Image: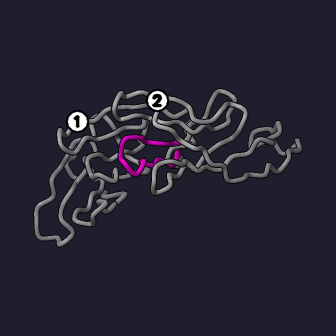
Amino acid sequence: ADRRPLWSPKGDKVAWFSDNTHENYVVKITSPDGLSNAEDISIGESKMAWEPVWSPDAAHIAFVDNKLRVRVLDLKTKTIKTVDTGGINIERGNMGLSWSPDSKWLAYSKTGDNNFRRIMLWALANNRVKPATNTFADSFSPAWDRSGKHLYFLASTDLALRSGWTNTSSMSTNPEYAAYVINLDNTD
């Protein structure tokens, strides 16, 4: 089962996740001409991968695994680290992983205790995660501008109480989402 193919930033490599080793999934990386053998890099105990995204400097691939861990694979050292864990199971494949243009930050959304998503930022330099949005807005879909000075996302601050999707006896409101921007500075 070969899954989730992605081009490297320069288009000189293709990567995908595969289970052809009969163990855990691996990342396979090769040239796009199909003439060279693919390199296999283990993704450790992860059984599956969602949302892979290559860093703009081609040094890392970030992805979400079967246990909702946000993981970053260092392609030079062939090491992998878990940078965070998602909030709820249904966000697997929907965390919106997004690298900053300088490859120093990874943005994504994570569901909190109140079931609202927050935009989180992970710093490559110090391996720290911090929230970029507050707990009172449902925020998701982060995207960096080309300069890396602005982070865009969608959010709603008018979510109302609602019941689970299987309960048809209650009424809920239709929240409105809008685009927001955070002006970033050089502090961490």
Residue 19 falls within the magenta-colored stretch: no
Where is the C terminus found, in terms of image quarters?
Answer: top left
Residue beneath the point at 22% across and 65% down: 12
Residue 101 falls within the magenta-colored stretch: yes
Depth order, front residue of 8/40: 8
Percent across and percent down for residue 33 are 17, 72
Depth order, front residue of 185/85: 185
Question: At label 1, which amino acid type do we have?
Answer: Thr
Return the residue found at the far front: 186
Residue 36 lies in quadrant: bottom left
Task: Please report the bounds of the magenta region as a residue range.
Answer: 95-108
Depth order, front residue of 19/56: 56
- Which of discs 2 and 1 lies nearer the camera? The answer is 2
What residue is shown with label 2? 129
Q: Is residue 52 left or right of residue 121?
A: left
Question: At label 2, which amino acid type do we have?
Answer: Val
Q: Is residue 20 left or right of residue 104?
A: left
Residue beneath the point at 45% across and 54% down: 147
Residue beneath the point at 36% across and 45% down: 62
Residue 186 to residue 148: above or below: above
Where is the N terminus found, in terms of image quarters?
Answer: bottom left
Percent across and percent down for residue 137 are 71, 38
Depth order, front residue of 61/10: 10
What residue is shown with label 1? 79
Percent across and percent down for residue 184 are 53, 41
Q: Is residue 176 left or right of residue 144?
A: right
